[in-house]
Image (cartoon, rainbow, N blue to C red):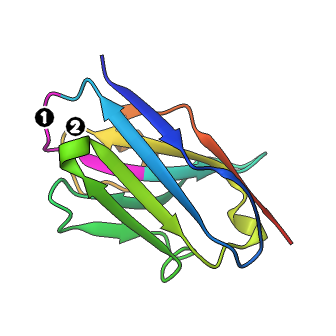
């Protein structure tokens, strides 16, 4: 059974930094794409960033480019998201997800498994 557990969320002031982690278990293959999405109250879940199995491919939403950095450690089945220069509009629940087809996927529907989410709140 695949499980994804996010950690590292919290409350931070505008301009601050947070680092999120997503630990996976039950994944029998290392060849899968991992992604971060977020959902603010009253809004749809949106793509934030994704990384291919080797780390050679990454993608970012325009709203986070230059501020967020995605990485992964396949030996630990863990993905990370370093978030710098945070803004109030980054406030949301952040979810990690896995695409077992290992595509260059940026859409919610492409991902097979999801974590429970971690809250990130940025105060102004």
Residue 7 placement, left or right of 1:
right
| Front residue of 121 and 47 | 121
Q: Please provide the residue range marked out in magenta.
A: 28-35
As helix, strand or loop, the secondary structure at mark 2 comes to loop
Residue 21 placement, left or right of 42:
left
Relative image position of residue 86 (x, y in whole percent):
67, 73
Pointer 2 residue: 100
In the picture, the quarter occupied by the N terminus is top left
Q: Main secondary structure of the magenta part?
A: loop
Pointer 1 residue: 29
Residue 112 placement, left or right of 102:
right
Task: State which mark lies toward you, 2 or 1.
Answer: 1
| Front residue of 37 and 3 | 3
Query: Answer yes or no: do the residues labelled 2 and 1 have beta carbons within 8 Å?
Result: yes
| Front residue of 5 and 39 | 5
Relative image position of residue 124 (x, y in whole percent):
86, 72
Task: Estimate the spatial distance between the alpha carbons at disc 2 and disc 1, rounded to whole Å.
Answer: 8 Å
């Amino acid at each position: 059974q695949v499980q994804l557990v996010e950690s590292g969320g919290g409350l931070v002031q505008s301009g601050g930094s947070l680092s999120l982690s997503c630990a996976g278990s039950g994944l029998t293959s290392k060849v899968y794409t991992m992604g971060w999405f977020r959902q603010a109250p009253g809004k749809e879940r949106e793509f934030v960033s994704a990384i291919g199995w080797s780390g050679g491919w990454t993608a970012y939403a325009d709203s986070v480019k230059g501020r967020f950095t995605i990485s992964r450690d396949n030996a630990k089945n863990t993905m990370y998201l370093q978030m710098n220069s945070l803004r109030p509009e980054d406030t949301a629940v952040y979810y990690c997800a896995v695409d077992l087809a290992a595509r260059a996927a940026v859409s919610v529907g492409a991902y097979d498994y999801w974590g429970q989410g971690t809250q990130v709140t940025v105060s102004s």
